Image (cartoon, grey):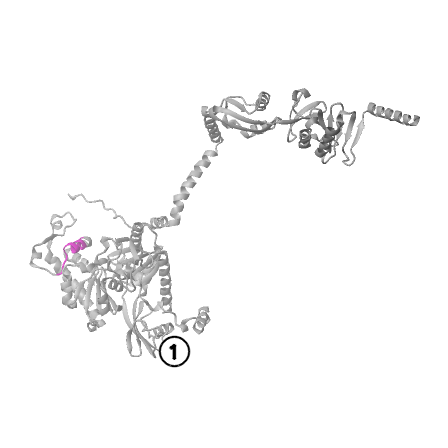
Amino acid sequence: MGDLYDSQRAMRQMRKAAMQRGVVAILDVGTSKIACLVLRFDGPERFRSVDGVGSMAGQSQFRVIGAATTRSRGVRFGEVDAMQETERAIRTAVQAAQKMANVRVDHVIACLSGARPRSYGLDGALDVAGGMVTEQDISQVMANCDVPDYGGDREVLHAQPVNFALDHRSGLADPRGQIGHQLTTDMHMLTVDATAVQNLFYCIKRCDLELAGLASSAYVSGMSSLVEDEQELGAACIDLGGGSTGISVFMKKHMIYADAVRMGGEHVTSDISMGLQIPAATAERIKTFYGGVVATGMDDREMIEIGGDTGDWEHDRRTVSRAELIGIMRPRVEEILEEVRSCLDAAGFEHLPSQQIVLTGGGSQIPGLDGLASKILGQQVRLGRPLRVQGLPQAAIGPAFSSAVGLSLFAANPQDEWWDFEIPADRYPARSLKRAVKWFKDNW
Amino acid sequence: MRSLIRRKPATTPRDPAPSKLTYRYQRLMLTPGFRASVRIGVPILLIAAIATSFFSKPENREMLNTRIAEAKQSFQTRPQFMVQAIAITGADDALTALVDAALPVTFPVSSFDLDLEAMRRSVEALDAVKSASVKVGQGGALEVAVTPRVPVALWRDGTTLRLIDADGVESGTVPTRADRLDLPLIAGDGAEQNIAEALALYAGAGPLRDRVRGVVRMGERRWDIVLDRDQRILLPDDGAVPAFERIIALNEAQDMLARDVVVVDMRNAQRPTLRMNAEAAAALRRVSEITTNDRAGD
């Protein structure tokens, strides 16, 4: 635990440095595309009229000055599969974004869509010594959480306190300064495969970039595509990506559960490719142009030329009806949604006060998907698009960019994580100077 | 069998990814400091290299110097800058000739070649010139404005008669005293340092003005006034003018200087002394002898 704790702290320092320089890159390494945004931070919001949440949910303090997308290579199921290829793809995206921004970026905040995320709910309790809750108590109560044995090959990606309770009062956002005896906390911890993180880290390092933050793609796409009341009352964000489908459940503005299904749009494409005996590129094109999940009588008559390049006339003039295409796509989409359903069931989604489901990601653009999803997932289904941020080009405002946009929001104001709080006193090294300084600070 | 459709040659598809070198190069070029140094440093280096290679050859340096000299020459010898004549103002003919001789300029000459300050100095070095201003005026004339020295006295130095002005500076010579009868004559060592006193004596001469031949500085400390008939008035070294005024008053009252007096010695103010000439003294002695004999005879 200590190792990651330190590396996360180091990333936070890096993020601070990047903020000071004012330029940071956002890198969404997906299975089908790699998106890179270059953000410029102009300091605190200038035209803030009153206190409270500023315009555009406080995210207008940054501006997108460069954006680039490239076809992803060497990534499978949202994990780096072939490092050299991925490195090249990242270089392509970063270079194009830098060129558009006309500024050099050194710090990058990345997100991870695959890597088998696993959620844990932790709770810890502490008897408040002085009667009043101090910052030290909060870090101590978080340290008191009993961490389950999540395995040596996994790393903690997020560890966010989602709730504080003092004696019998629950749902406290900030218990500091309040009087009570027993402080308890609930924490949500997300762990991922360590090797996937290390591979991504290595790829980014090979591009001469510094990693200033790492986030789960399901989490950040939920941040960008769920509206505020959905986050407050309870909602699930389904990010239908290329190689994996991310699920994140939000409640009281905190993520309380995240998971990923290792299936996505690429599997639909490969189904089409196998079913129609056509190359993957053609299958992708046909899927995006003619794809759907609900067949009508009209679709039987709409013939699609699927072509070929063999020189054989009969082979090169093949056609399929759109109904056939839908017949190939629908089972796979259903399968993905069924998997999502089982994940949500496992998370206890049905107990939430509101069960809004928001579909986002590139896969959510399949016509008729919302109808199919409402049959499988529940009645409250809508298609979500990411929040609009300043300076984002028209080509990058679609649902496929919800995790990139969410990552920008995450970069601008990240949620407090475990490692952002003070280190509990007993975790300091015994003969540390910091410990001595802290003793002085606490006693005078 | 060959296909009817011409197929594209089986080449590997172009990789859109930049090579590591290209990527690094672009990032380097986006670094602000490096960019500025390239934008400014490279042209400077280039210019410096070209200049160095040009000037490293002696014939190039030679050529450049010649070019510059030619251009300078052709600019300076334009008619606008040529000085054609000299105009000397404020001097009489003799002085004009002197000034002209002191300025060895051959016309026409470019005004860039004239060292006006040196010319002014050489003109002012002339005895008869108090101050001068030299400038290149309208119409290409070298204008020399001369303020001549005004002589206030003649100073006899041995056999030469020098003209000196109020500052005691010599401004020329005259062959004879008759040339400048209007000026007082002074003589003696150190006379030129006390012109003012000498002139005051002259100014106070009043009725004796016609009789004064000159004033002589004695022992570099006091004045003698020399009158005609070889009369001489010895004045003290301070209070010379009041002493002279006493003499004049005595002369008015008793017509003293019309008598056979050779020297009036005023050096001791309490005891003015007269010395008569030899005949008068002899006559006086004779008269007193006669008077004594007569008394004795009585």
- The x, y position of residue A392, in whole percent, is 26, 54
Q: Is residue B272 above or below residue A253?
A: above
How many residues crowd mark 1 within 10 Å: few (<14), some (14–19), many (20+)?
few
Of residues B275 and B23, the one drawn nearer to the viewer in this rendering: B275
Instruction: Residue lying at the far front in this picture: please name it.
Output: B298
In the image, is A248 to the left or to the right of B147? left
Q: Is residue A363 above or below residue B37?
A: below
- Helix, strand or loop at disc 1? loop
Residue at x 54% of width, y 21% of height: B106
Q: Is residue A22 above or below residue A147?
A: above
Magenta part of the chain: A282-293
Query: From where the camera sits, is residue B174 visible?
Result: yes
Query: From where the camera sits, is residue B1 visible?
Result: no
Of residues B41 and A208, the one drawn nearer to the viewer in this rendering: B41
In the image, is A374 to the left or to the right of B100? left
In the image, is A10 to the left or to the right of B248? left
**Residue A430 belongs to magenta span:** no
Of residues B106 and A232, the one drawn nearer to the viewer in this rendering: B106
Q: Is residue A110 above or below residue A122?
A: above
Q: Give residue B51's quadrant in the image.
A: top left
Main SS type for the magenta part? helix
- The x, y position of residue A260, in whole percent, is 24, 65
